[in-house]
Image (cartoon, grey):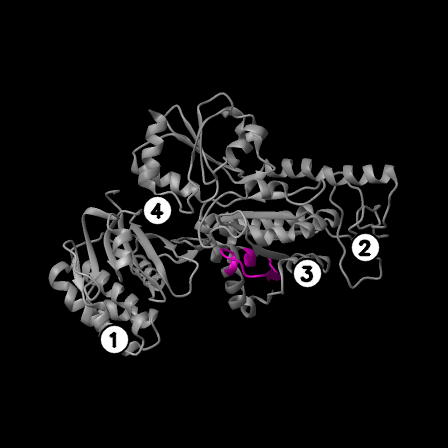
Amino acid sequence: MAQDVFTFLVGGKAGEGVKKAGSVSAHIFSSMGRHVFQMDDYMSLIRGGHNFSVISTTPRWIGSHYMKANLVVNFDKRSCDVHKNDITENGIIFFNSDEQDLDRGIGIPLTSEVEKYPMKNLMFGVGAVAILAAAIGFQKEEMNNIIKDEYPRGIEDNIRFADTIYDLVYPDCGNKFNLERGDKKRPIITGNEAISLGAIAGGLDVYYGYPMTPASSILHTLAQEAENFGLAVVHPESEITVINMAIGSAFTGARTMVGTSGGGFSLMTEGFSLAGMTEAPVLIVLSQRPGPATGVPTYTEQAELAFALTAGHGDFLRIVASPRTIREAYYLTSEMLDLVWKFQTPGILLTEKHLSESSMTVQIEVENSGWAEPKIHKAGDYKRYLDTDDGISPLLFPPSNQVIKWNSYEHDEFGITTEDSKKISFMHDKRNKKLTSLIEYLKGKETVKIIRGNLPINIFTYGSTYMSVLEAVRYGNLNPTIIAPIYLSPLPIWELKEFKSQDNVVIEQSSTGQFSKLLSEKAGLEIRTTIKQYNGRPFDPMDLSQKIKEVLG
């Protein structure tokens, strides 16, 4: 275990308040000025099964959870069986003594105690918070103030129950873990909340979403904020409707975003191609989960990279970018919304369940957000697809006394359907100019994050795996050069040339090494080996550190 990291793990059945206990614990650590990373693991069930939340905290920035926990609270036997090895050498395990009797750990009669209250099962989570509060030396008053804020229903019962559990725990492990306080309290948000807020900061007008894990909470977050920011947030009847309504909204000048996962995006691909032909500025949030087909709905993977890069039929510009951290998800979303409007083409913000649904402490400067600003037609006869030096045609929106024609068929500059061979080639050339313009524009942006090291090895990664890599090399006291492209299409090969003949290792969550193939094919990089994980779980820093050491020899 990293010496400066404290990890709390709570596990139980769905419906017992596991996730809420995790988020309340994260806020406790944040209130101490500490940095926090929370990962929630849950089955695709409403009740039963096994869920757990793992929260790692330290006074420094932290980019991953650690599965080896200092304090573990298990509500049931299954949780004890699953997490019996997820404990540090001097860690403490609490278990429900009404369900079992273990030689190792401290038993608390959780079931007997919750039966005294009307809320019953949901109070297990309150008990976990009380155990944590006692173990880190919080006074009852501090704990109760947090419970009042975080559990507004049945406050008196919650406090009474928490006090009972606190009194049972304190004699054995009161103030067992004396945690150092950090410099200041920071907000805790999920990746999907960061994406939602970044879109708002970038000028979002309309969001369309058909719920699909792990993108669903974007719809929920934006619906909650709709009135505050004048948003239209719509839940249509299908993903096909989502993409087509989004294109229609863009036609009227509305800055539009949609969200989905692999299966939903599969249904959107014809509409995605329509956006390519009509040059519609629509941003798609594609949050990956394991496939193919329904796959493992509530877990994480990075196996839709190739799909995102090639989705849609025909030749057209697709902008694809992937945030590496929750903080970056905020800024990159606003930047991508700006880019799709600048270059009038669809774009994909490619992320994954691990970033979408994990939480961490962040600090965001709103004034540094981008703002979507399209090129607007000023005067004279209007040609929707006017050929220009950069391939970007000025936009005009209804109401107008001029004809505004977006067309799914090949067309001329006015938008009138054509099958003339010269005009077909002409329009392809016109649209293709935007790629050159985009590359020149991106050369002035940070498109790749490079952290220089002193070891003769380079580690390439992207998306949320970047955070796992940073934590792994820190844990292992390793110092390779880490390279993480933010933009994947167009891939910034101008930034990657220097690594062509060097010792390159790739770390990704795809069984077929999709990111490795991209780097080899587009950037001409030689990849010595690829460290892959494709079991639906994010990398644990300790395990990943060992794998990196094995590669280093």
Q: Residues within 10 Å of mark 2 (few under 14, many from 20)?
A: some
The numbered mark, 3 or 4, whose residue comes first in the sequence reads 4
Q: Measure how far apart labels 2 and 3 are at the Cα level.
A: 17 Å
Q: Which numbered tag is attached to residue 62?
A: 4
- Find numbered disc 3 in the image and state the secondary structure of the residue it sits on: helix
Location of the N terminus by quadrant is top left
Boundaries of the magenta span: 199-216
Report the side of 194 relative to 11 (left or right): right
Q: Measure how far apart labels 3 and 1 are at the Cα level.
A: 50 Å
Judging by the rendered image, the residue that carries numbered circle 1 is: 115
Instruction: Give, as a three-letter code, the residue at label 2.
Output: Lys
Judging by the rendered image, the residue that carries numbered circle 3 is: 245
Q: Residues within 10 Å of mark 1 (few under 14, many from 20)?
A: few
Q: Which numbered tag is attached to residue 405?
A: 2
Q: Measure how far apart labels 3 and 4 are at the Cα level.
A: 40 Å
Report the side of 395 relative to 138 (left or right): right
Q: Residues within 10 Å of mark 3 (few under 14, many from 20)?
A: many
- Find numbered disc 1 in the image and state the secondary structure of the residue it sits on: loop
Instruction: Give, as a three-letter code, the residue at label 3.
Output: Met
Q: Nearer the viewer, residue 329 or 277?
A: 277
Q: Nearer the viewer, mark 1 or mark 4?
A: 1
The numbered mark, 2 or 1, whose residue comes first in the sequence reads 1
Instruction: Give, as a three-letter code, the residue at label 4.
Output: Ile
Instruction: Give, as a three-letter code, the residue at label 1.
Output: Glu
